[in-house]
Image: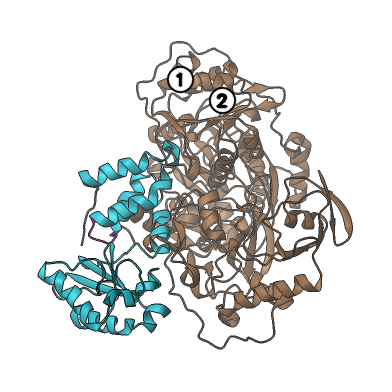
């Protein structure tokens, strides 16, 4: 610890802090453009100048470490003058186009000009102008506004792990660009828009859409993957205009993936806004009374074992709970939420959670990934692994298809039999595992959804118990889920203990299944249900709706208050930002109404009633998550003599940008997907 | 147009020598030397494939190498003549008549800078101080300096490249080293 003085007040700070950090600690705000807490220090904007006693010149506080006994002044006339000087230089080449700039109203340069800018310019020569650069379908550039803070370069290099942005030429002619103006090939690319302190990089889909002060801001939770990133939804009237990340150190820090950010234009397309019933092969609009009566008659006409419930990817916890209640009341045993086709007979939460937690990644000293393209399945978790890898060079091994994960790892091979060799201690990676004190294993759905997943999982459990994956303070067994609803639905028991989706397919094909009630399940193969009546409850006209006989329109994730549990088991509240379109209703109300018509006497009037009931029944869900959650063994027997004929592990995600009903209907996501295909096929754009 | 570039045997020898100066995990330090080797092999300029070849050789992202290429003024990203004439026009040279040298270049090579002459033999450009002000004005043609120029002997020097009997490098008025001018006459 070092004792320093900031504006005369003594304060003790850590030795490794910079002056800027120390000043923040002391409650002083230092203006800055290039400095960012999560990026390396560049020290090139010079806006953070402070006066240090004994130093003849002002000091760039972001790049200068504190020293014992230092006395710092942040508000003297000298500091103010120095910053005004810097500001004047920055503004020399910055256009005066705030009225037409999308950054206007939330621009660092604008804000700081108010404090340090001069009212007039002394520069009467021509301003520099720079050609617009192409950076892909998400990032709109207006490079004349660039002040060369290099945050975007450092982000792409350090956080996103794709070194594609750079500064070409030098001095006055310096320009920020991607190599030959290619699109940035990253799932995290749009975060540079938030990082840009000026309007040089702005959001292309949001271009000229709205001003920040006219938007209603709702802090809520993202559902595009199982991570549960914290987001802010900005709405103008009914429309969701944009989605921004919200700080949560435990989950997404301050990043979100491009899908979380830009799939929101899918909320406007193909919405189910009124109930539909199929008559003579055509879906006809109807009203709720008709639709619900139809729904009841469907359900009453079939025996419980002829009905199956499928829970989709965006179903919130309360709805999952009610679906489970409904199935129990009606004695329906075929209820499944695992659209990937997982068969494991889960008996404890720890068997399907990301137990180490996302923060826990930074404690681990070795990671073994089995059959998961973490980069596409959970970009936020991939970013966290990369961050940890850059800080502490930990060994990472991957079994399964070889993916570009943006960091170096040891590819052990695409062969499930490697699990056997690790559990037998014959693999080279065993030596690394032997030494590791807090190793992590990340199990992807592509392993768990295999037909022989029981064998694979028993080997994994062997490995887990053989090395130090588990002790009293550490649980290194992680299942990476793919969808926001999954943990909640599993917790509510929306799965069959030793059957899977594939068995429901089989039932449908042999005719023993007569009615499918699909609660927003769009990732299943509807061609298997040719001879089955289908009721679909959901928000978008995607695969499910087009195949159904009855459509009950419900709310999308931005249109309801709901609880989502992320892959770590962290329970988070999402809030309503806009309203379901037209006749569509909130999911829980639809099911509640069905229950009332069936005279089930649940007695729920408000959403809070449902939540209270859940809290009474499952108090554990509301606990804080931590990496010391004990692991309960799923399969009792120790694995013996297992070998895999079909040894290769596939990948779960075929196209990162098009994974669910919302993103498939998003124009922006379609464009991203198209451009990525062309990039990967070597056709540069 | 698709052109491909890879180091030839001679260049590879030089590359090997450059790489030997740095530890294996720091081989990226040799990027500037490698770019120079590539530029020489490629006829004085760096094409897209040359930049990418150097980048892959050193396992560097393309953009990082491209940054270096555009940062330094001695790497060229457009084709230059076989004889690349760099005319110094900074103050001392200008005072001693570099405008005349430029005029000669315009007549013999091309009206505009950075443009190949009709026979493809030359291109020329104005550069900042070449650091031989004592013998101003001067030009640098490829690796050599031609000093003490005026309109006439610039033309002679350029003509000598066309004819193939090269003028001697250095002072064109017989000055030895950078001796004072009166010694030249005696």
Point out residue A12 in the picture as x, y percentages from the top left corner: 84, 48
Q: Colour of chain A?
A: brown
Instruction: Kindly tell me whether residue A142 is visible in this rendering.
Output: no
Q: Quadrant of the C terminus of chain A?
A: bottom left
Is A53 rendered above or below residue A401? below
Residue on which the image places disc 2? A345
Is A52 rendered above or below residue A682? below
Q: Colour of chain B?
A: cyan
Residue that sits furthest to the right in the current view: A9
Instruction: Kindly tell me whether residue A197 is visible in this rendering.
Output: yes
Q: Please rate how many residues cluster around mark 2, counting C-alpha atoms within 10 Å: few if below 14, some from 14 to 19, many from 20.
A: some
User: Secondary structure beneath disc 2?
Assistant: loop
Residue range highlighted in magenta: B42-46
Viewer-proximal residue, A609 or A633? A633
Residue A48 in magenta? no
User: Secondary structure beneath disc 1?
Assistant: loop
Point out residue A498 in the picture as x, y percentages from the top left corner: 53, 25
Residue on which the image places disc 1? A428
Disc 1 vs disc 2: which is toward the camera?
Answer: 1
Is A39 rendered above or below residue A111? above
Viewer-proximal residue, A502 or B104? B104
Q: Kindly indicate the quadrant of the structure image that contains residue A390.
A: top right
The reply, left or right, for residue B118 in relation to residue B182 is left
Point out residue A446 in the picture as x, y percentages from the top left corner: 45, 34
Q: Kindly indicate the quadrant of the structure image that contains residue B121.
A: bottom left
């Amino acid at each position: 610890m070092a004792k320093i003085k900031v504006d005369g007040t003594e304060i003790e700070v850590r030795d490794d802090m910079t002056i800027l950090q120390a000043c923040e600690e002391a409650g002083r705000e230092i203006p800055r453009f290039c400095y960012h807490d999560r990026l390396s220090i560049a020290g090139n904007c010079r806006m953070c100048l402070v006066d240090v006693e004994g130093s003849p010149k002002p000091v760039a506080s972001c790049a200068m470490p504190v020293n014992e006994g230092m006395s710092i002044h942040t508000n003297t006339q000298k500091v103010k003058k120095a910053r005004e000087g810097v500001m004047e230089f920055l503004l020399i080449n910055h256009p005066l186009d705030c009225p037409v700039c999308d950054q206007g109203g939330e621009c660092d340069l604008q804000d700081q000009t108010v404090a340090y800018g001069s009212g007039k310019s002394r520069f009467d020569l021509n301003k520099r102008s720079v050609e617009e650069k192409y950076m892909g379908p998400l990032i709109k550039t207006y490079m004349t506004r660039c002040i060369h803070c290099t945050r975007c370069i450092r982000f792409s290099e350090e956080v996103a792990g794709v070194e594609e942005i750079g500064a070409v030429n030098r001095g006055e002619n310096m320009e920020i660009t991607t190599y030959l103006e290619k699109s940035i090939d990253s799932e995290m690319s749009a975060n540079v828009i938030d990082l840009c302190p000026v309007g040089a990089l702005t959001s292309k889909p949001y271009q000229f859409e709205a001003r920040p002060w006219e938007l209603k801001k709702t802090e809520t939770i993202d559902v595009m993957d199982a991570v549960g990133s914290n987001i802010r939804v900005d709405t103008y009237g009914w429309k969701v205009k944009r989605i921004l990340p919200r700080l949560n150190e435990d989950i997404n820090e301050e990043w979100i993936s491009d899908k979380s950010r830009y799939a929101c234009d899918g909320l406007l397309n193909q919405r189910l806004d009124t109930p539909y019933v199929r008559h003579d092969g055509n879906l006809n609009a109807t009203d709720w009374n008709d639709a619900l009566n139809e729904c009841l008659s469907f359900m009453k006409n079939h025996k419980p074992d002829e009905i199956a419930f499928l829970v989709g990817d965006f179903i919130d916890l309360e709805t999952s709970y009610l679906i489970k209640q409904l199935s129990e009341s009606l004695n329906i045993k075929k209820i499944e939420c695992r659209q990937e086709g997982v068969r494991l007979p889960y008996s404890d939460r720890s068997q399907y959670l990301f137990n180490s937690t996302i923060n826990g990644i930074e404690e681990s000293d070795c990671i073994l990934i089995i059959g998961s393209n973490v980069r596409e399945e959970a970009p936020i978790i991939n970013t966290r692994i990369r961050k940890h890898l850059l800080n502490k060079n930990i060994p990472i091994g991957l079994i399964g298809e070889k993916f570009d994960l943006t960091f170096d790892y040891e590819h052990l091979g695409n062969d499930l039999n490697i699990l056997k060799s690790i559990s037998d201690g014959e693999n080279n990676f065993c030596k690394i595992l032997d030494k590791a004190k807090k190793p992590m294993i990340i199990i992807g759905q592509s392993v768990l959804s295999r037909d022989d997943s029981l064998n694979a999982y028993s080997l994994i459990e062997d490995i887990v118990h053989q090395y130090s994956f588990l002790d009293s303070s550490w649980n290194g067994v992680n299942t990476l889920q793919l969808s926001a609803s999954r943990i909640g639905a599993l917790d509510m028991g929306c799965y069959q203990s030793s059957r899977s989706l594939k068995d429901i397919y089989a039932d449908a094909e042999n005719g023993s299944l007569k009615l499918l009630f699909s609660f927003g399940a769009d990732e299943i193969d509807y061609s298997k249900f040719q001879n089955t009546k289908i009721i679909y409850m959901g928000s978008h006209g995607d695969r499910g709706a087009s195949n159904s006989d009855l459509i009950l329109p419900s709310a999308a994730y931005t249109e309801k208050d709901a609880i989502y549990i992320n892959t770590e088991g962290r329970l988070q509240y999402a809030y309503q930002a806009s309203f379901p379109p037209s006749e569509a209703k909130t999911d829980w109300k639809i099911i509640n109404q069905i229950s009332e018509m069936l005279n089930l006497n649940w007695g729920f009037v408000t959403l809070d009633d449902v939540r209270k009931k859940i809290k009474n029944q499952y108090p554990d869900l509301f606990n804080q998550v931590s990496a010391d959650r004990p692991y309960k063994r799923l399969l009792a027997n120790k694995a013996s003599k297992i070998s895999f004929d079909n040894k290769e592990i596939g990948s779960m995600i075929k196209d990162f940008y098009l994974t669910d009903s919302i993103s498939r209907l998003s124009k922006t996501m379609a464009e991203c997907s198209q451009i990525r295909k062309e990039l990967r096929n070597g056709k540069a754009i | 147009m698709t052109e491909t570039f890879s180091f030839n045997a001679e260049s590879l020898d030089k590359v090997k020598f450059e790489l030997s100066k740095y530890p294996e995990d720091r081989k990226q330090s040799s990027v500037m030397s490698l770019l120079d080797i590539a530029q020489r092999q490629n006829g004085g300029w760096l094409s897209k494939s040359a930049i990418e070849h150097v980048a892959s050789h050193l396992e560097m992202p393309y953009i990082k190498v491209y940054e270096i290429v555009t940062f330094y003024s001695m790497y060229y990203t457009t084709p230059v003549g076989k004889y690349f004439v760099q005319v110094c026009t900074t103050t001392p040279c200008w005072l001693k008549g570099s405008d005349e040298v430029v005029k000669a270049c315009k007549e013999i090579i091309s009206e505009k800078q950075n443009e190949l002459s009709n026979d493809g033999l030359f291109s020329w450009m104005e550069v900042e101080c070449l650091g031989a002000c004592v013998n101003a004005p001067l030009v640098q043609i490829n690796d050599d300096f031609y000093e003490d120029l005026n309109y006439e002997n610039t033309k002679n020097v350029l003509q000598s490249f066309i004819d193939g009997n090269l003028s001697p490098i250095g002072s064109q008025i017989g000055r030895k080293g950078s001796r004072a001018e009166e010694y030249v006459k005696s």
